[in-house]
Structures are given as structure tokens and as C-alpha cells.
Image (cartoon, rainbow, N blue to C red):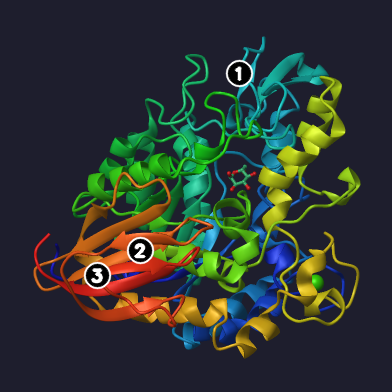
Amino acid sequence: MEKEVKWWKNAVVYQIYPLSFMDSNGDGIGDLSGIQSKLDYLKNLGVDVIWLSPVYESPMDDNGYDIKNYLAIDKIFGTMEDMKNLIEKTHQMGMRLIMDLVINHTSDEHHWFLESKKSNDNPYRDFYVWRDQPSEIGSVFGGSAWEYDEHTDSYYFHLFSKKQPDLNWDNPKLREKIYAIVNFWLDMGIDGFRLDVIDLIGKDIDQKILSDGPHLKKRLKELYDQCFQGRDIMTVGEMPGLSLESAAAITSGKNPLLDMIFQFSHISLDEIPGKGKWALRPLDLIEFKNVFEKLQTTMFNHGWNSLFLANHDQPRAVSRYGNLAYRVESSKMLATILYGMQGTPYVYQGEEIGMTGVKFDNIDQYKDIETKNIYQILSNQGIPHEEIMASIYAKGRDNSRTPFQWDDSRNAGFSTGNPWLDLNPNYKEINVKKDLSNPDGVYHYFKKLFQIRKSNQVFLDGKFIPFMKDNPELFGYYRKNKKDFVLIIGSFNDQSMQIEIPGKILEVLITNNPTIEVTNKMEIPPYYACILRIKGDQ
Ligand code: GLC
Ligand code: CA
């Protein structure tokens, strides 16, 4: 353990999806001024770092993950002045702000691409990937990853939508432009980046190696040397296809290439292996526990984890892993299990009040390009509407993108206009105002949990040791350092169950049900959670 602990190891990060957080001017779209008006709410929760999903100028084909101009704020979100104000205000309140950096691809409306399309000898031609013939690589959003362009009679590569052409990282001129953009924002005073699908920038398309490609480490190193080195920032790389071993290597050492990584091994466990995200199967808790144990032990003293269950691409955590019949209990239980581990905690907006997924009747109510594409593709294959909708209800990205639920007034207090995406109709029941007014609300629990994490060193450096490893309904583990020994317990059981806790129980640090007396042999109610300080060797 290094002497001086890096600030981001102790930080709580809160992800804002700007389109859906808070609308300040009644156009139905969340914006920067809206975010600024809610900083107190975040500060009070114990947030240290705000991560903003993209706010750059964009045609919004993929909600801002398709950038048209890296150096401008999209006018739906506000102005560059608003951005500077937000950074300043965030800093004044003792918080930091990181931006989303989408540099695997741009929008097809970016002027580099408009130039690139013009001719084979255009100076920007090699900023993108052009081939005479397509290969069989498929797009993440369905269909081929190659789009034919008549003008030069060739195909360009897009791993996401056809409006998101992939940049050609083999081109040093492109890389130079990217570094200038990254430095522009860092010089403006932001505190780091979440790097979108950054595992893809080392790819070798002709060899069909995409994630964790042959050039990845070298590219990350150059990015680090040109932009990150010597700055007091944090970086977190989204790396869906990366092995745990590579994740550990990239985030370890004195000057890691990236401070931490979003690793996805726990995320795909409710999918039929090899069949993609829409083919559902029930989660096996033992598998889920094993994945976390592996993450926690592999990265112990060798890299750094980011702790997350949800984000703007994933369904709501409580709908996915909890139980809506026990919404409040299971929201708290999931937080206990997740944030008791080693790593930097991430909260996705709304998770802290137990917001849930949504079930719209009509496919037209969905706005996400991935959902729209998959609906089309599966319908064309003859799959019945109900079956497709079941997958979309479970996994669609709009689940977590519905407008934030501030109160029970019109549009949940999110906007006075017409929201760009319909609200979850449950906003009268589930909203900030109601949750905050209840001392047993989810928000207060998250807040307390973060305070406990920060005031007990064992959450920072304690070793992870599984507890009741073979139990299919209970997720338990110890954290242990030289001075301290804690036990974290979370029930995934919708029935009461018996558990036995060895050792002397010294203190209950937190629990989602204080009416239950904690003893060595106890019966715990559905979705029970607690963190205990105990004495003794294990
Ligand atoms: C990342 C983003 C996702 C986006 C994709 C393409 O996975 O989180 O929202 O669609 O990259 O940029
Ligand atoms: Ca607005």
C-alpha cells in the first residue's frame, strides 16, 4: 500500500446522464444549468466526483456518444460559459468533475469525416477506416459494421451505429489531434475523464481483433505521456472486452496508464453465453459472487477496481438484481454489497433513491438507437412482439435513461416542458422529495454507507475473504486489514433464512433493518443487509 493514498481511491463518483437529470429551461431536455442547480443534492449525498456523460456538440444519434465537435458544448445543454461555470461551482463546493471522452469514433457529421468521405486522397481520408470490401464483423447495434459509400465506392467501418464511424488510431496525425482535444479540456480545469470503449483503440480490424488489440497498451501509454502525465486527475477506462489480467496490468504500478477500469465480467451473467445481451437467463448468485471474488482478489494490491452495477447502458440495478416487492430493502442491500468492496464506488443517477426500470407499451416510446435497431432486427426474424419487449424491458438502455424523479409534481419536477423521453409512471411513488423525507429512505442509507467507508480504513485496504461462499441466496464477505475485521452480508433471498456468524460481534456499522437483533445465530428477513465489526481471526 503506497504511503500517500490517491484521492480517487477514496472518492465517490456520481454519473450524470445530462439529457435526463434536470431541465432548467423547459425544452424537455436536461442541461448544464439544471445540473448546476442540483449540486447541493449531490454534495449532501457524499459525492466527490461528478462524471458527465457527453455534452459535446452532437447530432444525438447515440445521445452524444456521436461527437460532431469535441471543442463545443451542444446547444441543447447550454454554452461553453455554462460549462465553465459548472466546473467552477463544482470546485467551489469541494467536488470534482470528469467528462466522457469518446475517441474510438466520431459522428459522421464531424468535419473530419465529411472531408474523409470526399476522396481517396483527401488529407483526412486516413482519419477513418476505409476498405474496398467489407468483412463479416458485426456492429454492436446490429447489422454489419461496414457501410457502403457510393461516392468513393468503398466501405467505412463503424462498430456502433453507421453515424459513428470508427477513427483510425494507426494514423499519427489523428492521434495528435486527439491529444490536443484532451489537453484542451484538461487545461480548462476538468479533473479527468471516463474513456468510452477505450479497449477498442488498439484494434487490428483486418485480423478481426477488436477489444484488447495488439496496439492497446502502446496507445494508452502515448495518451498518458501526451496528456495525463503529471496532472492531478483521475481516469477510468470503459473496457467491456478486457480480461481481468489486462485490467489489473493497466491500472497497476506507480504511474498506471489508467487509474481504473470498468470491467464487465459481472454484467453479462444474466445473458445466455455467446448469444448477446438480449438472450436472457436468470442470474446465478454463486456465479455472480465468484466473479466479484475474482475481481477483488486479482486486483488486490495490483490495480484498482471501479465498483458499479448500473450505468446509462445497463438496466436499473434494483430491477435487475434486487426485487421490486422489496424495492427499498433490496436497493440498500445491493449498495451494501457493492460499496463494501475494494475500489472506487460509482452511483448512477437515481440509484440513490431506488429508481426502477420502465415498461413502455409502445415501441415508439423508446428512443435508444440500440433498442430501436434490435426491435427491427428481431421482428424481421419473426420473433413475436411480446418476446422482444420482454428482452427490452429487461435489458433496454432506456430503462436507466428516463427523466430523473425529483418530486411528485408534473414531469416529476424534471421539466416544465415535454420530456424528450417519457417518464417512468411510478414517479409519484418514487422520487427524491419522498425518499428524502423518510429517515429510512434509500438516499440516507447511501449517504451513511459512504461515511462509513470513508471513516474506516479497512474498506480501502482490507483483504476480501468470502463468507458462506456456497450459499446460493446470500452474498457475504469479510474485509480484513491489520487492525480491523468487518463482515458484509446481503441476502438475495425473498424468504427469511438462518445464518451463523462466527466470532464476537462488536458493532453493527450499518443495516437496512435495525429492528433485527444481530446475534451469532440469527434469522434474517428477505433482502437483509448489514456490515458488522467483529473480533477474531478468520
Ligand atoms: C459506450 C457508451 C454507450 C455508447 C457506446 C458507443 O459503451 O457507454 O452509451 O453507445 O460506447 O459510444
Ligand atoms: Ca433544457
Residue 63 shows up from this direction? no
Observer-nearest residue: 374 or 226?
A: 374
Q: Amino acid at mark 1?
A: Ile
- State the residue position of label 1: 137
Q: Are marks 3 and 2 in contact (CB under 8 Å)?
A: no
What x and y, as percent, mark residue 206?
Answer: 51, 14
- 363 shown above or below 416: above
Mark pair 3, 2: CA separation: 13 Å
Q: Mark 1 or mark 3: name the one nearer the start of the chain.
A: 1
Describe the element under mark 3 as helix, strand or loop.
loop
Residue 454 located left or right of residue 439: left
Residue 218 located left or right of residue 97: left
**Of discs 3 and 2, which sits in the foreground?**
3
- State the residue position of label 3: 520
Rendered image quadrant of residue 41: bottom right
**Of discs 1 and 2, which sits in the foreground?**
2
Q: Residues within 10 Å of mark 3 (few under 14, many from 20)?
A: few
Q: Mark 1 or mark 2: name the one nearer the start of the chain.
A: 1
Describe the element under mark 2 as helix, strand or loop.
strand
Q: Which mark is residue 489?
A: 2
Residue 476 shows up from this direction? yes
Observer-nearest residue: 294 or 173?
A: 294
Quarter occupied by the N terminus: bottom left
Q: Amino acid at mark 3?
A: Asn
Quarter occupied by the C terminus: bottom left
Q: Are marks 1 and 3 in contact (CB under 8 Å)?
A: no
Describe the element under mark 1 as helix, strand or loop.
loop
